[in-house]
Image (cartoon, rainbow, N blue to C red):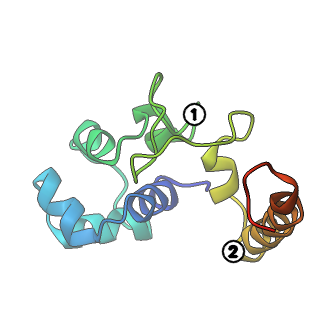
Amino acid sequence: MNTFGERLRYARELRGLSQKQLADACGLSQSAISSYERGSRKSTQKLLVIARKLEVDLYWLDGGTGHMRPAGQSRLAMGESWPFPSIPPEHIMALSENDRLAVEKTLRALIDSLLPRLPGMPK
């Protein structure tokens, strides 16, 4: 994710929002959000509002610096705690779709191999 538009789209999709939903929440038009994501529109006076609605760090959204999540934020979009403290969720999401699928398959195989050995789990 090298551009503001790529980060904006990624964060919006991670939160499960359409362009229209984000635009409405920020007082913008859907076409403005689309323009930002395509890179045909560069700056916005609503950057802080957008960052807050997406629950992302302002500096990460604008320039790609720092962590995606604001300091102290430990919840995902679904309200669940991220179970892997040494792997930030944005690192997983920065992978290509094929690489994420490979990670998912590998993790699924590892979990499947461990579950029968865990106490109280069906065999």
Q: Position of residue 64 (x, y in %)?
A: 56, 41
Say left or right for 44 vs 82. left
* Image quarter (top left, top right, bottom left or bottom right) of the N terminus: bottom right
Rendering coords of residue 57 (x, y %): 43, 34
Which of the two residues, 42 or 25, is positioned nearer the viewer here? 25
Residue drawn at x 47%, y 23% as measured from the top left = 71
Q: What whole-number distance in Å separates the C-alpha atoms at marks 2 and 1?
A: 21 Å
Contact? badges 2 and 1 (CB < 8 Å): no
Which residue does the image show at 76% across and 77% down from the upper left?
A: 98
Is the residue marked by circle 1 packed among few (<14), some (14-19), or many (20+) residues within 10 Å? some
Q: Position of residue 8 (x, y in %)?
A: 42, 56
Query: Sequence-wise, which precedes: disc 2 or disc 1?
Result: 1
Above or below, 100 relative to 65 = below
Looking at this view, name the residue that lies furthest to the top: 72
- Name the image quarter holding residue 112: bottom right
Q: Indicate whether 36 appears above or below 83.
A: below
- How far from the left and from the top, in percent, is residue 55? 36, 41
Q: Is residue 47 above or below residue 117?
A: above
Tag 1's secondary structure?
A: loop
- From the viewer's side, name the closer residue of 119 and 49: 119
Q: Name the residue tied to disc 2.
A: 97
Question: Label 1 belongs to which residue?
Answer: 67
Q: Label 1 amino acid?
A: His
Neighbour class for label 2 at 10 Å: few (<14), some, many (≥20)?
Answer: few
Say which quarter of the image contains residue 122: bottom right
Quadrant housing residue 93: bottom right
Q: Position of 114 compared to 101: left or right?
A: right
